[in-house]
Image: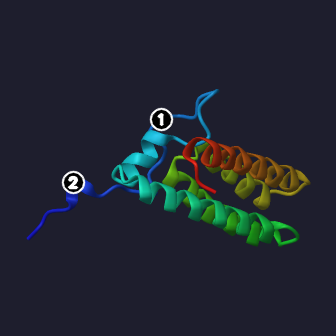
Amino acid sequence: MLDFSATIVRVDSPPLAPLAPGEQAIDIAHLSRMTLGDHALECEVLNLFLRQADMLLARMKGAPPANIAAMAHTLKGSARGIGAWRVAHATEAVELAAKATGNDLNAAVNTLAAMVEEARALIVDALGVD
């Protein structure tokens, strides 16, 4: 029987390194670990992330705060999986704003959208996917 325990990587674990100013929008080393260095899989996962992010951001517009929080939580897991730490941090802010009272939710969603665009730019430009 084969032992795959050495190749299992937890997606729900916190980032391996804290977000640092100037850090890339995608942690390429983390992404490589998550895809076991398979470049084709990296491209596929990044494309899936972009499609999911677009869909969830579009659905957040006009949705009730509880739904926005749930969608942000979903996106957070995907962002952590590819090493998009800035997106993951922005989703956490959306989750918190959705549970609080006040007008911070729209600002948090706008920040999240900006972080997704930053990740998109790196994915499209540096990795050559769209």
Q: Which residue is mark 1?
A: 17
Residue 87 location, x and y as percent? 65, 48
Closer to the chain start, of discs 2 and 1, is 2
Residue beneath the point at 64% across and 60% down: 50
From the viewer's perspective, is residue 21 above or below residue 87? above
Report whether 82 appears left or right of 87.
Answer: left
Residue beneath the point at 26% across and 56% down: 7
Foreground residue among 33 and 39: 39
Q: Secondary structure at mark 1?
A: loop
**The C terminus is located in which quarter?**
bottom right
From the viewer's perspective, is residue 86 above or below residue 20? below
Give residue 74's quadrant in the image: bottom right
Q: Pointer 1: residues within 10 angstroms few (<14), some, or many (20+)?
A: few
Which residue in the rendered view is the most extreme toward the top? 21
Give residue 54's quadrant in the image: bottom right
Residue 48 location, x and y as percent? 57, 65
Residue 52 location, x and y as percent? 64, 66
Give residue 1's quadrant in the image: bottom left
Q: Secondary structure at mark 2?
A: helix
Foreground residue among 100 and 129: 129
User: Which amino acid type corresponds to the residue marked 1 in the rendered image?
Assistant: Ala
Q: Which mark is residue 6?
A: 2
Which residue in the rendered view is the most extreme toward the left? 1
